[in-house]
Image (spheres, grey):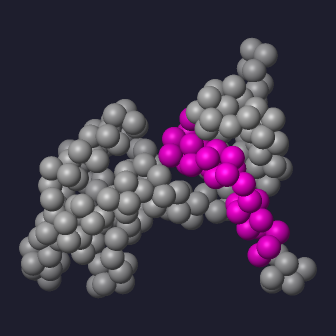
Amino acid sequence: MSDLNFAASQLRPLLISKTRAKLLSLFLNNPGKIYYVRELVRSVGEQINAVRAELSRLEKAGMLTSENRANRKFYGFRKDYVFQSELTRLISKVSGLGGDIIRERNKLGKIKFATLSTGFLRRLPVNSADVDLLVVGNVVVPQLAALVKKAEDSIGREINYTVMSEDEFTFRKRRKDPFVGRVLERVGVVLVGDEEELIR
């Protein structure tokens, strides 16, 4: 099989329908959660036959696992799927907090960088030392706080975020500030800004 044919065979399951896009967003924004078919139909707002067809395709492509419990079939996203991390980063830019930040970017001020942590993408339990969201720039903080609150209500956990001016961020990065270093080590996705510039 040629490189192009292999690429096409691997990527084709990702790029087809609206129903599939909604299902992938739901599964990847709720890692570890399993759903039965009617629950998925309600959540994505699509016809049951379309949802069943996409679930079958996604399972055949190796993205989903399924199991039967008490006369219901449950589906969950496979953690060992080869493109799981990349898909999670992609989905985080078009839905949830990440999607809101990108959509509302102009209302949030002049943002140089915005990042979400790996722990946030995986929905790991948060502790006070973790920073889920870093925003650098001249930020309209109340507008950002409203987006964070909306996301907290949606995912059911607190979101720790830090806002810095560009000057403060640059200064602390140059001084090898331990806090900034920890945040940069745990970046899962860059929503706004150039990743190389952020890290260097």
Residue at 69% in and 47% down: 19
Q: Nearer the viewer, residue 118 or 182?
A: 118
Front position in the image: 155 or 124: 155
Relative to 155, 140 lies left or right: left
Q: Residue at x 51, y 41 (%)?
A: 30
- Asked if residue 47 is positioned above or below residue 113 in the image, the reply reads above
Residue 104 visible to an observer of this rendering = yes
Is residue 199 visible to the viewer in this orientation of the structure? no
Q: For the view shown, which residue lies furthest in the right direction?
A: 1
Up-down: is 7 above or below 26?
below
- Residue 139: name its quadrant: bottom left
Residue 19 among those drawn in magenta: yes
Left or right of residue 98, residue 62 in this image: right
Task: Quadrant for the N terminus, please.
Answer: bottom right
| Quarter of image, res 43 | top right
Which region shows up in magenta? 7-34
Question: How far from the left and from the top, in percent, is residue 194?
Answer: 35, 80
Q: Main secondary structure of the magenta part?
A: helix
Q: Which residue is at a point 30% across and 53% down the rendered structure image? A: 132
Picture quarter containing residue 8?
A: bottom right
